[in-house]
Amino acid sequence: MDKIGNYIIPAVIFIIIIFGFIKKVPVFDAFLSGAKQGLKATYMMAGALIGLITAVSMLKASGALDLITNSLMPVAQSLGFPAEILPMAIMRPISGSGSTALLNQILKDHGPDSTVGMMASVISGSSETTFYAIAVYYGSAGVKKIRHTIPAALLADFASAVMAVLSVKLFFGG
């Protein structure tokens, strides 16, 4: 079964080429056209991605994340939101790799079967790297005015964090 995975992608490529020949599509020309469009999309996204990476690096290096976390900690704890997962919940919309590193640390410290570990895992699986997604999709489409996208997306991330805590408490106690 392990060996079949080695043949799937070449088989799909072969099927696409055969289907193109049957339909009389200039396969190589279509490939070059698609590659050209891909490079244009990459060029359109580059500025937004470079800005996002710079902002995330500055946020981490400046200590702003710690400041935000510490200021929200009393409110979060009074609402029953564990202090251990607050930094990850804040980092998740900003940086996928940063939030994954925080998730790994939570799982090392508390274990994957702990209440905190389960809450962090649910947050990770049910939320989005909002700013990255906006930068990639809007950047590739050339969208300049994002209107209500960021507030709506951050509200969805907040709702996923709250529901993660509530659902783990409901289904597993804690």
Image: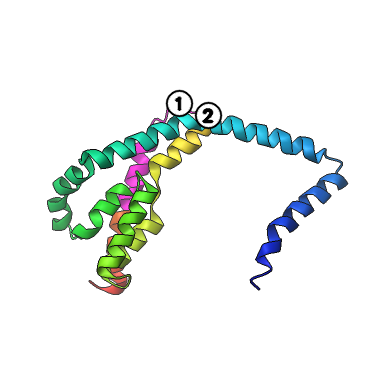
Q: Nearer the viewer, residue 162 or 15?
A: 15
| Rendered location of residue 69, percent (x, y) | 19, 48
In this rendering, the answer to whether 40 lies above or below 155 is above
- Closer to the chain start, of discs 2 and 1, is 2
| Rendered location of residue 90, percent (x, y) | 28, 48
Q: Nearer the viewer, residue 160 or 124?
A: 124
Question: What coloring was used for the rendering?
Answer: rainbow
Q: Circle 1 sits on which residue?
A: 144
Residue that sits furthest to the top in the current view: 144
Residue at 39% of width from left, 30% of height from top?
147
Is residue 130 left or right of 117 when viewed as pictured? right
Q: Quadrant of residue 102?
A: bottom left
Q: Which residues are magenta?
A: 141-159
Q: Is residue 126 magenta?
A: no
Is residue 2 left or right of 134 when viewed as pictured? right
Q: Nearer the viewer, residue 107 or 143?
A: 107
- How many numbered tags mark residues here? 2
Q: Circle 2 sits on which residue?
A: 44
Disc 1 residue crowd, few under 14, some 14–19, many 20+, Cα 10 Å: few
Q: Is any part of residue 81 visible from this angle?
A: no
Q: What element does badge 2 sit on?
A: helix
| Rendered location of residue 84, percent (x, y) | 22, 59
Q: Is any part of residue 66 visible from this angle?
A: yes
Residue at 28% of width from left, 62% of height from top?
106
Kind of residue at disc 1: Lys
Kind of residue at disc 2: Met
Q: Circles 2 and 1: CB distance less than 8 Å? A: no
